[in-house]
Image (cartoon, helix red, strand yellow):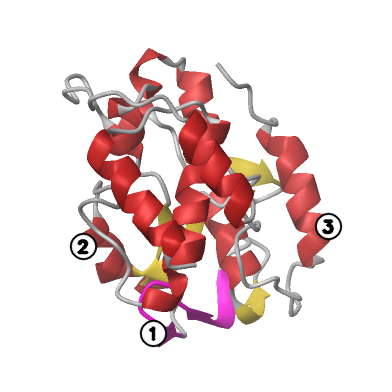
Amino acid sequence: MRRSTPLLRVAVAVAAAAALVFGSTVSASAAPPEPPGLEESRAHLEELQVAPEGSGDGYDRDKFPHWSTVEGSCNARESVLERDGAGVEVGDDCYPTTGSWTSPYDGATWTEPSDIDIDHMVPLHEAWKSGADTWTTDERERFANDLEHAQLWAVTDNVNQEKSDQDPAEWQPSLQDVHCVYARAWIDVKHSWQLTTDDAEKSALSGMLDGC
C-alpha cells in the first residue's frame, strides 16, 4: 500500500504555494496540482490492475474521515476553496468571506462558498470498491484529504451531486475541454493510491486521453 505524505507536511507546502494569510487576499493558484502529462498518464493507465469492482458491502462515508484540519484553523475543504478561488479573503476561522470560484466541470462561476462542493476526483465509494476497503482508517483519511494530487476539486454543488460516485465510464464533465485533465487526474489518483480499474472504466479513460 502506498503511504501518502502526512497531511501536515502537505498543508505546509500548499500554504506556502498559496501565500496563505488570514484576513487578507490570497494569491490563488486556481487549480489542483497538475497531474502527469499525456504519455506518462497512458503508461500509468496500463500499469493499473484491471479487476471487477467490489460489491461496495460495508461502505460508509464516515470510514473516510474528511475535511480534516491541515494547518491552524484550516481544514482540507477550506484549503481547496482558498487554493482554487480568485480574490479570496478569509476570516480568522479560515472560512472565505469574499471570492469567486469557476467550476471546471461546467464553467459556472460562483461567489458564495456554499454553492461550491469539494469533489473527490476518485469518489470515496469508488475507492472503496477499488481496494480502499482493505485500508486502515488512517489511510482512508489521507486519501479523503489528499492535497498532494489532483484529488480535490472545487466544483458546482449540483454537478458534484450529479457525478456522485460514478466513474468515467458512467459520468464525464459537460465541458469537453476538461476531459483530458480529468482523465489524467483520475489515473494519477488511482495509480498513486494503487487502486484498481475495471474494463469499462479503463476504456473510457483511454478514450478521454485520445482526445487530449
**What residue type is disc 1 on?**
Ala
Nearer-the-camera pick, 192 or 138: 192
Tell me the kind of residue under disc 2.
Glu
Crowd class of label 3 (few under 14; some 14 to 19; many from 20; radius 10 Å): few
Between discs 1 and 3, the one toward the N terminus: 3
Query: Toward which corner of the image does residue 16 lie, by quadrant?
Result: bottom right
Q: Position of residue 42 (x, y in %)?
A: 53, 46
Q: How far is mark 1 from mark 2, CA to CA? A: 15 Å
Which residue is labeled 1 in the image?
108
SS assignment at label 1 = loop
Q: Nearer the viewer, residue 130 or 38?
A: 38
Residue type at numbered disc 3: Ala
Q: Which residues are magenta?
A: 96-110
Compared to residue 193, the image places residue 92 above or below, namely below
Q: Earlier in the sequence, mark 3 or mark 2?
A: 3
Q: Residue at x 51, y 53 (%)?
A: 184
User: Which residue is found at the position 56% from the left and 40% from the top?
Assistant: 43
Contact, mark 1 vs mark 3 (Cβ under 8 Å): no
Residue at which label 3 appears: 16
Badge 2, how many Cα within 10 Å: few under 14, some, many 20+?
few
Q: Is residue 98 left or right of residue 50?
A: right
Compute the Cα span from label 1 to label 3. 28 Å
Q: Position of residue 60 (x, y in %)?
A: 25, 29
Tell me if residue 107 is in the magenta stretch. yes
- Answer whether residue 87 is magenta in the image: no
Q: Residue under circle 2? A: 162
Secondary structure beneath label 2: helix
Residue at (63% x, 62% y) in the render: 94
Q: Tell me which secondary structure the magenta stretch mostly adopts.
A: strand
In the shown orientation, is residue 76 left or right of residue 87?
A: left
Kind of element beneath mark 3: helix
